[in-house]
Amino acid sequence: MADDWQNGGFGLYVHWPFCEAKCPYCDFNSHVSRKIDQSAWVDAYLLELERYAAQTPGRVLNTVFFGGGTPSLMAPETVDAVIQAARGHWHAANDMEITLEANPGSVEAGRFAGYRDAGVNRVSMGIQALNNEDLRRLGRIHTVAEAQKAFDVARNCFDRVSFDLIYARQHQTLADWQAELKQALSMAIDHLSLYQLTIEQGTAFGDRYAVGKLRGLPEDDTSADMYMATQEICEAAGLPAYEISNHAKPGAESQHNQVYWRYGDYVGIGPGSHGRLTIDGEKFATESHLNPSMWLNQVSNATGESVRTSLGTQDQANEYLMMGLRLVQGIDMDRFQALSSTPVPQDRLDYLKDIGMIEHVGSTLKATKEGRAVLNAVIRELLVD
């Protein structure tokens, strides 16, 4: 169990908490600020990296991911400093994947060249819609034309460029989404992230929905049809799903996200970041202060970490199940049993198999196509108290 994390690898997540504007559907830890002292952020990131590296010596770092917020607002020098520090603290894998999230409105050719020179080798763009009216409803500050131009800039700098789209949007029909998805596939290089719009509490959309002012959302059956159409269209185009919301050509899957889904270890630095770390044979969940100013202040005093929780064996087994079943390939039940103090009741497995929600062959347990469409319900059946 002390080495279980090695089944998933080791990654670094860096959270940049700033955006040019706050989108009404977003529940990520993002803030709008007129003035950002990038040198102060570099200093804080480097302090946190040094602290975590001392707790995880000798590891091979497989992936780095700059998320947010809008990391494409970071100065290339900031990104470079973090990457070089990470390389200095850990052994870099020969094929280390370094991803940076970008919003089309913040893409500049010179800055992107700087990210490339710093070592970034993959970009994930938040395009979200290929329809100007829907971009406006989503609170995005770019147009479709600007998104396509930004995508071209990124493609000229990087071999690997993914982008995100949101479906089941207000007033969107199944036919609308099918046409938009086919347009996206004509642009795509080798990876797409396709998310169903979810209404989260604490967001502007959540507030509107609560008082009946978020009109035109598709019915559940229409949303389900959109999900199934997404699977079929992407698979036919050579980008099958490898995870609930992610599609890629074989070999082009996001390595960083697979550290999460395969239940590896990852350091999380930056306001609101989370981590999973195995130290001296014990697995911990870490959380950081949400407020950017508080996080900076706490880092300079001691640590940006606000909570560290020891995870028991059943907690780990359940997290592995919840994360791993998102992958089309599923989970290894031998690994689950090695973590778990209590097996999944056989009657639950039999029931889900009988109704076509899971496949259980040998030591592999995975959700079927139908099961992935209602994955949360499948997982609830399988979780062990």
Image: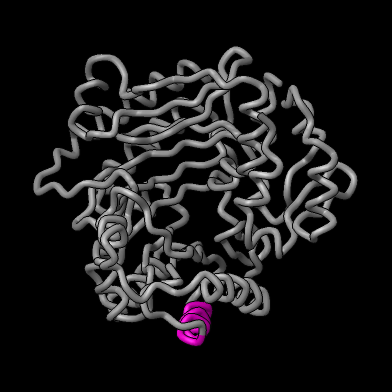
Residue furthest toward the left? 34
**The stretch drawn in magenta includes residue 182:** yes
Q: Position of residue 121 (x, y in %)?
A: 46, 54
**The stretch drawn in magenta includes residue 80:** no
Q: Residue at x 37, y 53 (%)?
A: 200
Specify whether 266 is left or right of 14. Answer: right
Q: Residue at x 31, y 76 (%)?
A: 134
Q: Position of residue 18 (x, y in %)?
A: 23, 47
Nearer to me, 225 or 131:
225
Position of residue 174 relative to residue 2, above or below, is: below
Nearer to me, 139 or 213:
213
Q: Position of residue 363 (x, y in %)?
A: 85, 42
Residue 112 visible: no
Position of residue 327 relative to residue 219, above or below, is: above
Magenta-highlighted residues: 175-186
Place residue 227 in its image quadrant. bottom right
Main SS of residues in magenta: helix
Say how many tags the image has: 0
Place residue 375 in its image quadrant. bottom right
Specify whether 211 is left or right of 174. Answer: left
Q: Residue at x 31, y 61 (%)?
A: 209
Q: Which of the image's four quarters has the C terminus?
A: top right
Q: Which of the image's four quarters has the N terminus?
A: top right
